[in-house]
Amino acid sequence: MGKRNRRTNNFIVQGSILAIAGLIVRIIGLLYRVPMTNIIGDEGMGYYSFAFEPYSVMLLLSYHGLPTAVSKLVAARNGEGKFKNSYRVFQCAMIIAIVIGIITGAITYFGAGFIAGKLSNQPMSTYALKILGPTIFILSIMGILRGYFQGMGTMVPTAISQVIEAIVNAVISLVAASYLFHVGKNYDLVTNSRSHAEAYGAAGGTMGTCIGAIAGLIFLILVFMLYKNLLRKQMKKDKSRHKEDYADIARKLLWTSAPIILSSIIFNISTTFDGALFSNLMPIAAKMEEEEVAALWGVFTGKYKIMIMVPVAIATALATSIVPDFSEEMAAGKKGRIANKIQYSIRFTMIVAIPSAIGLSVLAKPILTLLFHNVSDIDVNLLRFGTIAVIFYSLSTITNAVLQGINLMKKPVTHATISLVLHLVILAFLIGVCKLHIYGVLISYIIFALIICVLNALTIQAKLSYKQEWIKTFLLPAISSTFMGGIVYGIYYLLYKTVKSNLFALLISILVGVIIYFVMLLLLKCIDENDLRRMPLGEKIIVVARILHLL
């Protein structure tokens, strides 16, 4: 294969490495949150979630925008062979990250009482939010290291650090949540108060987040120290004379990161607004107590959202690799390659997202029953009818990255703002007027991502005169997934009635579902040998497909 195919394969492979790590991290997150939910209950998970929403907004300010800007600017300079200026971007970004990390971390720590008590109307989540303050500073530094490695064209350090962070987070969260839950329980007994057990337990969960971040940062620092010899060799080869001024680099970093931060804040703050709106409207609309509202919100964020975000990790990882890759292509003036990469990125994402959505829907009850002790009809219905969000959030994530990669930095901000306003109006109407309660949150949550998908698609089409291929991207995966879903549903319930084992029936039905879906994609010509060669282990898959006469 030529150089062009090798570059395309590397782009997919790097994204796949991060995607695999992302899936592992999501699965670990899902697995540890299950026992944590069982330890601190839905009420405790509600406090945990209410703490994470404002923390996530602060984290976006200090962590999300700058690393993406670093990867984008570093990749552009590396594409031109300007390795010295590339390293200066890293140095400048690190200073900015430290300053911003200190400011946002201090605001979160010292303002926890006001944020939790006044803004979220959940004062018991203050304990958990305080612990997340120092975490923001740690992640700010970690983000720059990850962004630099991504800009250099390797996702491996980021991937490994994410897994380390997740493992340490899981272990510490469970131990700390269990210990502090019992401390809070004793406090409630002595003082004749309530909810301190759940609130302290939630704080234990956030303690794991902090310690996990420290572990990930230590790993990245070690890798960077080992990487410095290669950096020196690259900079010796750099014959460019122009040395970029740090002040100019800082302006470019802030100018590049600002729209990314704004779009990400708006994209993620919707849940914060949802929580605040839900927390304030539900006592009026449904006469619910504070604890009941927290428990219901804990179900939405601690069960439903956790489940659907596992497959969305594929799109998130691919999006991370898109931004520096597209930036390098744009800097080199190779715009012709971008349309092909957009086509394949969206196809690859939908080939994973569509069957994930249908699989989660048809197996909603057995999956939740396996993972959680207490499963209600609300839990099952949210997942069964809300999995279409997997498709829309995956598509909005990947198209946001495309817009950022082709230097349309402001468009995701505009689109997210429009979607947020419409989303909040719809949410207030569904809860306050239609009395749909948590289902109103579900519907508006899906609509939010759908609006962004439509606006992003129209903008990409207008900018690049680009039209996404529909049959192989959406129609054939949908047909294959629907057929697979029907077979999986039947196999699960037949096995469950026979062996009376939920775990066994689930594992077998999921395995059969993966095989059926893959076979259907080949039979319907949705993917061919060229597509398979671009995927990790593609050559081995081709060999197996030929043996089975599927190619």
Image (cartoon, rainbow, N blue to C red):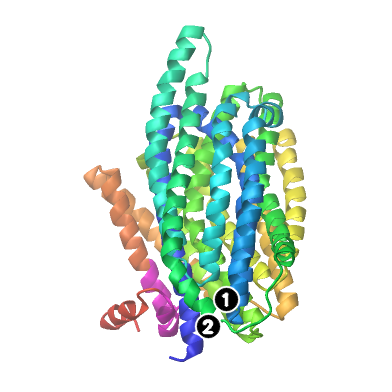
- What secondary structure is the magenta-colored segment mainly? helix
Query: Residue 134 location in percent, x, y?
Result: 56, 39
| Residue 74 visible somewhere in the drawing | yes
Instruction: Characterize the local packing of mark 1: few (<14), some (14-19) or many (20 or more) Cα atoms within 10 angstroms.
Output: many
Query: Residue 378 location in percent, x, y?
Result: 52, 36
Question: In which quadrant will I find the C terminus?
Answer: bottom left
- Callout 1 amino acid: Phe
| Viewer-side residue, 231 vs 519 | 231
| Viewer-side residue, 298 vs 222 | 222
Give the magenta range.
517-535
| Viewer-side residue, 160 vs 246 | 246
- Callout 2 amino acid: Lys
Q: Is residue 34 magenta?
A: no
Mark with earlier residue (2, 1): 1
Instruction: Characterize the local packing of mark 2: few (<14), some (14-19) or many (20 or more) Cα atoms within 10 angstroms.
Output: few
Q: Secondary structure at mark 1?
A: helix
Q: Residue furthest bottom?
A: 2
Residue visible at 57% across and 74% down? 325
Residue indicated by mark 2: 237
Find out whether the residues at labels 2 and 1 contact each other: C-beta distance under 8 Å. yes
Residue visible at 64% across and 61% down? 92
Residue visible at 50% across and 39% down? 302
Query: Residue 334 location in percent, x, y?
Result: 63, 85
Quarter residue 491 falls in:
bottom left
Q: Is residue 529 magenta?
A: yes
Question: In which quadrant will I find the N terminus?
Answer: bottom left
| Viewer-side residue, 29 vs 260 | 260
| Residue 19 visible somewhere in the drawing | no
Position above or below: 116 against 289: below
Position above or below: 244 against 137: below
- Give the numbered dot on residue 83: 1
Residue visible at 67% across and 75% down? 243
